[in-house]
Image (spheres, rainbow, N blue to C red):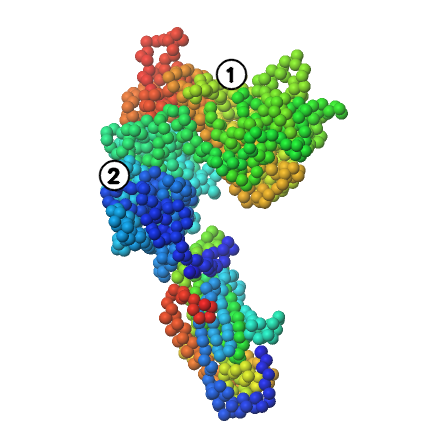
Amino acid sequence: MQTLREFTRKTKRGNILKIVREHYLRDDIGCGSDLCQYCFQNEVYQLTSEHDIKSSIFKFPHYIVLDTNVVLDQIDVLEENVLHNVIVLTTVLNEVKHKSSSIYKRLNEIIHDRTRNFYVFVNEHHKDTYADREPDESANDRNDRAIRLAAKWYDTHLHTSQASKTFQSSGRTATRVVLLTDDAGNRAKAEAEDILVASAADYVKSLEDFPLLVDKLSQKTFENEKQALPQYPPHLSMKELLEGLRYKKLLQGSFQASRENYLEGNVNVESYEKGILIQGRESLNRAVDGDIVAVELLPESEWSAPSEIVLEEKNVYADDVPSEERVEEEKEMLQQVQTAPAAERTPTGRIVGIVRRKWRQYCGILQPSLIEDTTRHIFVPADRKIPRIRIETRQAAKLQNQRIIVTIDSWPRNSRYPHGHFVRSLGPLGNMATENEVILLEHDVPHCKFSEEVLSFLPKMPWTITEEDYAKRVDLRDLYICSVDPPGCTDIDDALHCRELPNGNLEVGVHIADVSHFIRPGNALDKEAAARGTTVYLVGKRIDMVPELLSSNLCSLVGGVERFAFSCVWEVDNQANVLSKRFHKSVIKSKRAMTYEEAQALIDDSTETGEIAKSLRHLNRLAKILKKRRMDNGALVLASPEIRFQVDSETHEPLEVEAKQMRDTNSMVEEFMLLANITVAQHIAAEFTECAVLRRHPKPPPTNFDPLVKAARYQGFEVAINTGLELAHSLDKCVKADNPYFNTMIRILTTRCMMQAVYFISGSLQKEEFFHYGLAADIYTHFTSPIRRYSDIMVHRLLAASIGADSTYAQLLERKSNEELCNNLNYRHKMAQYAGRASVALNTHLFFRGKEEEEEGYVLFVRKNALQVLIPKYGLEGTLYLKGDKDGKDGLERTKSEVIFTFNEEDHTQRCGNVIFHSFDPVTVRLSLDSSNVQHEKLIFKLVKPYIKGFSVETAPEASTAATAQPPAKKSKKDKKKK
Amino acid sequence: MAYVALSEAEKTFILHGVEEDFRCDGRSRRDYRPMELETGLVSNASGSARLRLANTDILVGVKTEIDVPNPLTPQFGKLEFFVDCSANATPEFEGRGGSDLAQELILSLQNAYESPFAFDYRTLCLIPGQQCWKLYIDILILECGGNLYDAVSLAAKAALYNTKLPRVTATLLDAGVTDLIISDNPYDCTRIGIDAVPLLVTVCKIGDYCLVDPTAEEEVCSTVSMVVSVSMRDNEAYLSGTHMTGGGSMHRDTMLNSIQLGLSIGEQLNSLLVKMLKSEEGRVGPKRPKTVGFLK
């Protein structure tokens, strides 16, 4: 049988086409039930009588038909291994696919799990269940009708199957079909058509054996809240929003909540350089970080400036009556900013509607509740930009000390917090594995094990090099090649050599692991690597981009073993001028894998005269020339406080912290990698003008430098920012004799002004935009770390194709797919970076558990109510609050601090008595971990030096010579919280 | 035109029949042969009709497209005719054999539809000066049994009646650019008003008499024919174009007579066609019928 489906579609060029598709209806689609004797069944029965579920509403065996809204809202319930014998209609599947690709993926995973007995019934092609669209029927109504039709058909179909005498004599209860839908209209119609129907919530509540499943129900409303007064202005309807956006009355942008002040945020709108400031609870109007929102700009007289206050939301309870104090505090904050000087005011607006929610799942903890046995709880997300979420759970006691995942369902006007539901638990608090999992999830790092399919594309072990391989590659096994890496590195992707040529010149080679030899384009392994994009390094843990067999064995250029490499070889003169270059694939045998320290020792030890030592010395000398040349060109020396942890191999807890040391050899390797990257970039950009994968670092807009220029000016230095060269020079001049760390601090600030470097495709931008600002290079790419970066694999493939060492394939040269790939790589890189930082922060936290240390630090910024302090030793930045904490609710006693700080807006200083805090001033702070609240450990900063009576903590007894009869400063007061 | 070989005796016989007002198939000079009409049979087209007039077989499909109005007539949409003389109709059409005839048919249709009184081009306009519908009326001649002009115009009018344009709403984007949004309901359509759409009536002069709906044989006997295009306005027949075919010439009085005849016949033909189309639509309903008839 055949029918036609007609629809109209608009083409890209604006034409309107009528499209007609033939739609075939079949009579051989099986119902998938083992009760059925009529249907043609072409696979294993999916619907079996094995799984009986006890429901108090339907006291007989039943199959479940899901409506689309149930799948979309209650996917967490479906994922639990509770519901079996579920019929998924293709109508539902298509609708889900259309509405949310992530839920579609999750649903598919359930369907593919055979043990779950989810059966996909192709109702759209079954001759009895196909519903043709009626005139005056909306697409949605038609789908609802198709779902009801299928449910009805199933019920009657099973009824006839079970009418036989053999079945009746078996004494079993007849199986029926139940439709679950949350659409009241659909439910009413289904009842009218004699279909057994229930809402998802009612059904889940009726399950006798699984009371805890109720927690996972998506919460659109909480019962006793319906009468509560609205706390937020209403959102505009979608139509009003679109109209407003069209007439430019409203502006659209993505909302970014402030990390420091929960009542402040920013909307990035294209035409506004700094975005639009949003202040106050009502203006924020329920936007959550990342949402695409519509903003209405306030009249200029109401514009305000970003507050300099660090405001953290205090503990609240599910009963949720905003305490008067808190309201006052919020008011106060708003008042302060409204009196801001006109010069600092920026465009300010209020959010009038949400264009698209970007809600995801959030990790966090449950806040302990005051009332016992309550089911309503407040969830505190790990990410400070996310508001607290209100959930209902019956297992609060169990979840109290666990990291859990919660998702937001809705945020009605009358609720202060969004409503959500519990998804799953990650594990106990403070456990290294749990915390790592949190970091990975929060940063969207794919970290599941490699699937069987991916592993099947690995080379079979034992792996040997064949004659054919030797024939295709240049044999460099006799060269004195060695690798220099940090200690403990197992994924060695670069090695170097240098030898003297008879003509007096030098030959320098950079040899990069030939990963693209093992990862062939388009297979599952390649796709997985492309999706992961990069290896993620956490403290004491590495999440590989490619399976370990490759990363730590076959590709890794370990010492003394024959390995495939992609070599880039230059001939240079003694002044490090490149005379010629060539690229080829090769077989190498690294003579030695060294650490930076070992290599340095080898260079410094003049008694060593071996080939390796000689070539290292040459390399080192050349690297210094290269570096000098780069600096003269305007490359920036940036600094960011980086530290390493020594991790206990068993408990994975940090034992020792050390700042990363820079040796000559580090910069030696770095220089040659830069040279290789630049050389390759020039080559592939010339060979593939449209599709070369390159990396650029855009020049930051001048406003980015504002904080830097301001901060330097207070100290009497002018920072020129017009060009990279000027910036580099003026940074060199920022030296203070009495503050040796000052220059580093200025560089740290400069680093924060920079833009992100990004991958791009050469055809997508003009040549002038290829520039790499930080390196002062006209063109740049990543070639030297294919084991841990997918971009390098792409570059390898391009390079191999250009020199005829490997074949090209269609996708390699296609600009669009490469662009998508680049976007993913950029995203993954950013996330990997953040994850790495989060992991360091976490370990710093753990390190201070049970410790109390006094450390030298520097004031990074002076805020209105706090100082941002940087501790170079730990690379740690924290807030030293100067004003007392007003909220008494979180169990802390109230301060009656007589110490008053005055903030001077002109030169950004804080004064108390005769002590003045400037930016960059050295301070001594005491660090300790406040473990009074197991759930929420905080790193606390307390001032030690300069000493302020009544504010600073006493120095340790043995050190304090002038220990006056001061009572010990009250504990845990002028807090807290690491950034 | 398809060539039919006739002997002198046969021609005389036909001539005498016309003189007696009793033609070979028993009709009078003002009579039409029976017709068969079916609409909406080509699902890929926005509108379609198939007309069979004795042995003449015509299939018309209407396709729609978005276009920019002519700057001189910013309020108007566009129409374009295309005639394909299939070699199925007669072997003479093979290759480019039918192109002259096709051209002639296109010209007379364009001529008839040219006046904005004959076809309301304003209904095809979406945004004046910016966007309008352009209708492609593709006419396929499947069999040639005389009186092509009349058959083609009847089928074209029926196809236009059957045409459903998706309902389009315009939204204003930035910088005055408009964007069209189509309704997602396939049944939500606009129709084309066909009240004034002209019909062509061929008045054929054989001997001293004029007749309508000539058969292929009668056409051979005729020295000259006049194609009269008749457009209805306020229940009165208006002339929207004429076109002469054949080698002969016409006396002034004969011409006036022919036009009179054409107008009165056209008026009748139009009311009959509209009646039939309405009754067919009432029978089938808004949903597309199961394929029956010609394309089954």
Between tags 2 and 1, which lies in front?
2
- Could you tell me if residue A707 is visible in this image? no
What residue do we see at 37% from left, 45% from top? A46
Q: Check the residue under mark 2 and report the chain it is in.
A: A
- Give the labeled residue for mark 1: A738
A30 and A7: which one is in front?
A30
Residue at the outermost right position: A503
Report the label total: 2
Q: Nearer the viewer, residue A696 or B38?
A: B38
Q: Is residue A405 left or right of residue A739?
A: left
Disc 2 secondary structure class? loop
> On the image, numbered disc 2 is attached to which residue?
A208
Q: The disc labelled 1 sits on which kind of residue?
A: Asp
Residue A335 in percent (x, y) is at: 34, 33
* Quadrant of the image containing the N terminus of chain A: bottom left
Question: On screen, B5 above or below A913?
Answer: below
The residue at the point 31 percent across, 52 percent down is A161
Q: At 38% across and 11% down in the image, what residue appears?
A: A956
Please state which amino acid type lies under the numbered disc 2.
Glu
Residue at the spot 57% in from the left edge and 29% down from the top edge: A462
Residue situated in front as seen by the camera: A174 or A62: A174
Q: Is residue B82 above or below residue A968?
A: below
Disc 2 or 1, which lies upstream in sequence? 2
Q: CA distance from mark 2 to mark 1?
A: 74 Å
Residue A206 position in % (x across, y down)? 25, 41
Instruction: Residue A549: give x, y in percent of width and height.
Output: 53, 29
Mark 1 chain: A
Residue count near mark 1 (Cα–Cα under 10 Å), binned few <14, some 14–19, many ≥20: few
How crowded is the residue under tag 2: few (<14 C-alpha within 10 Å), some, or many (20+)? few
For the C terminus of chain A, the quadrant is top left
Residue A409 tag number: none
